[in-house]
């Protein structure tokens, strides 16, 4: 049986392992255990953000994760959410776990009064892009830029 729940500090090691797997797919990011642990700890202690996990009760193991971070949008005139780090461990993909995580993230955002959710996905990750499209997410005309 798989449940979706809010992450807790005892999940950090498993979440870091999932991020390591994710960052092998997303070529813009380099895995750094210390940085990822720090970021997860900040999210865990934030009152306005959330980390959701998919846990197998049979295996007592975290199989997937998703984070939602709150931002303020002038376009929406209020809070919106940035969905990040949606990953399901490779051996457990295509079993509906990602769908459950995403649905719970949307529900959490609605409960928080967020006016919109947005996400970034690797443009070469066709399976992820197809997944989001099947879940009703739409492409925009915006392009992501960053400065490090």
Image: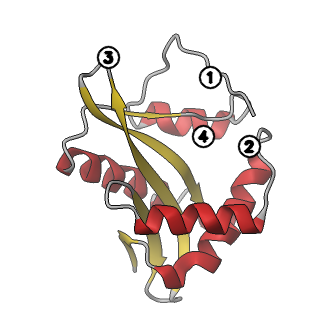
Q: What element carries label 4?
A: helix
Marks 4 and 2, the one that precedes in the sequence? 2
| Foreground: disc 4 or disc 1 | 1
Taking the spot 45% from the left edge, 58% from the top edge, the residue there is 96
Q: In which quarter of the image is the C terminus?
A: top right
Q: Determine contact: label 4, label 3, CB under 8 Å.
A: no
The answer to which of 48 and 17 lies nearer the viewer is 48
| Disc number placed over residue 26 in the picture, else none | 2
Marks 1 and 3, the one that precedes in the sequence? 3
| Disc number placed over residue 144 in the picture, else none | 1
Name the residue tied to disc 3.
Answer: 75
How far is disc 4 from disc 1 in space, using C-alphas? 17 Å
Is residue 60 depicted above or below 80 in this figure? below
| Foreground: disc 3 or disc 2 | 3
Is residue 33 depicted above or below 85 in this figure? below
Please state the horizontal and vertical placement of residue 115, each as a whole percent of the image.
24, 32
Marks 1 and 2, the one that precedes in the sequence? 2
| Disc number placed over residue 128 in the picture, else none | 4
Q: What element carries label 3?
A: loop
How far is disc 1 from disc 3 in space, using C-alphas? 17 Å
How far is disc 4 from disc 2 in space, using C-alphas? 11 Å
């Amino acid at each position: 049986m798989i449940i979706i729940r809010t992450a807790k500090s005892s999940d950090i090691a498993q979440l870091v392992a999932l991020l390591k797997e994710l960052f092998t797919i997303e070529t813009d990011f380099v895995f750094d255990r210390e940085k990822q642990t720090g970021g997860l700890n900040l999210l865990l202690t934030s009152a306005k953000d959330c980390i959701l996990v998919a846990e197998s009760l049979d295996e007592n193991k975290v199989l997937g994760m998703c984070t939602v971070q709150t931002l303020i949008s002038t376009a929406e005139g209020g809070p919106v959410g940035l969905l990040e780090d949606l990953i399901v461990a490779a051996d457990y993909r295509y079993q509906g776990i990602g769908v459950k995580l995403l649905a719970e993230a949307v529900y959490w955002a609605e409960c928080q009064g967020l006016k919109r959710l947005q996400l970034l996905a690797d443009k070469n990750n066709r399976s992820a892009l197809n997944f989001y499209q099947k879940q009703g997410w739409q492409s925009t005309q915006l392009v992501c830029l960053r400065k490090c």
